[in-house]
Each structure stands twice: as structure tokens, then as C-alpha cells.
Amino acid sequence: GGLSINTWWESNIKGLFPVGECAASHGVYRPGGSALNAGQCGSKRAVTWILEKATGGWSPLGVEEECVKEIEEMVSSSLSGEFDADSVYDEVRRVMSISGSALRNCEDMKNALAIIDSYLSSFSKIKAKSEGRIWNLFQLRNALITEKVYLSSMIETAEKRIGSRGSAIYTDDKGNIHPKNLDDRFKYTLEKEGERLIQEVIYKNGEVEFFYRKPRPIPLDDDFFENVWREYRKNKNIF
């Protein structure tokens, strides 16, 4: 999974291009080299589009003052909190690695999400060790929000019994696959190919919402290299 993008790697936020592995440009079965390709090709496509189409003057999002206020509040309390940012970061990374990695159990993920939510709701109590480490608070907050979104997504998948896919095993007590000599955590069911839907997630005002859509079809258009090259020389295939 990753951030939703268009064919030029632009997100739903105008002017934000999340190229590379953070973008949802790969599928369930992802070759190891695709992350590198996504960074290189995505960056080139984004720059090509920006040079041809972007003339500046993107409209403000309308949340600038709110963001500045939120940053000021974080900085003002950054040295007087109750919890150490580095220790919290180590804890939530460990929790995420145990509960949200390749083996996913619904109850374990719910317990992990409760920990993440508790830190998000009391974030003003988290402090940096020094002024030079205030940046770590922003990194930690970003990590907490990201973990909340991904854990919520995984829990939704487990509760709907969508099934295991890709490199993830979702523990299912009613699963029809149970490898020999492994405990019940490894009991699971594969996702049904014909019923596959794409889960899309929106994080807004501290809440996570889910939407489902059918996979986009593979384009049927095909053409000779000479024709594609001719169009590229004409307009760089930017449309």
C-alpha cells in the first residue's frame, strides 16, 4: 500500500508528488527491484510533468494558519512533557514490528492500536531531550499517524475476513490452511482472486475511513514503438 497517486505521481494534494515506495504504485505481488524503479521512474515522470504543466500559483490549501498554530503548540511544550520522545519512538516501533508485520493477529493489532491512540491523544505530554532534538517530535507524530492508519487498515481487513494476500498472513481461526508443525497463529485463508477489491483509506480529523473499489483494468491500448516515440518527441506523452 501507499499514498494514492495518478500516472504522474501526483497525490490528491495539488503539487505533492510522493514518488518511490511511499506511493501506491505497486501491487500485491511486488518484485524487490520495483521500489528502486518507482523512485527513479516516478521522480522523472513527476519532474517531466512539472516542467511542462506547472506554472506555479498553486492555490493555498486553506489550512496554513491552523498548521502553524499546531506547530507552535508542539514546540512550546516540547521540553516540558512527561514522556521521552526517543523512548516512545522505540516502543511504538517495537509494537508495530510485532503486531503489524508479516504475521497479523486481529487482537494483537487492536492492542497495538490502543497504544498508538493513547500516545496520539496525549501527544502534548511527550518531550524532546533538548532543543536540538525537537525535530524528533515531528518525526514521531508522523510515525504515530502512519501506524494508526496502517493498523486500522489491517484490522479492517482481518475483521472482514478478506483473507491473506501477498506477503501477509492474517490469522483466521476458521482458515482452511494450517502448515504442519506451526501453531494456530499460522492458520489462515487465502483471498479469493475473483472477489478482490482495493481498499482506500482517508485519515481526517484523527479518524480513519475506508472505501473499496474494483481494481483498475489493464489498459488495452497497444502501439508500435515508432508511434509512441513519435508522440513522445511531439509532446513527451504528457496529457
Image (cartoon, rainbow, N blue to C red):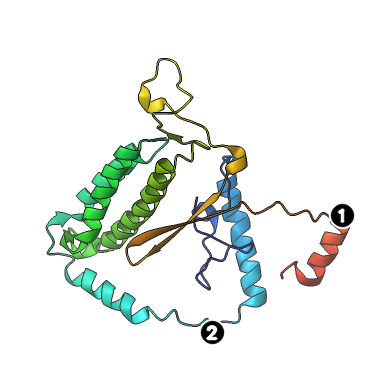
Q: Secondary structure at mark 1?
A: loop
* Pointer 2 or 1: first along the chain: 2
Using the rendered view, name the quadrant where residue 84 is placed: bottom left
Q: Quadrant of residue 172?
A: top left
Q: Where residue 232 sits: x, y (%)?
A: 79, 65
Looking at the rendering, in which quadrant would you find the C terminus?
bottom right
**Eyeballing the image, is 56 above or below 193?**
below
Residue type at mark 2 is Gly
Badge 1 density bin: few <14, some 14–19, many ≥20, Cα 10 Å: few
Q: Position of residue 139 (x, y in %)?
A: 32, 59
| Residue occupied by mark 2 | 57
- Which numbered dot is residue 43? none
Mark 1: which amino acid?
Phe
Q: What label sits on residue 224 in the rendered view?
A: 1
Residue located at (46% from left, 20% from top): 179
Q: Tell me the residue at 26%/61% (across/down).
A: 137
Q: Is 201 placed left or right of 239 in the picture?
A: left
- Local secondary structure at mark 2: loop
The percent position of residue 104, horizontal first and vertical second, equals 38, 36
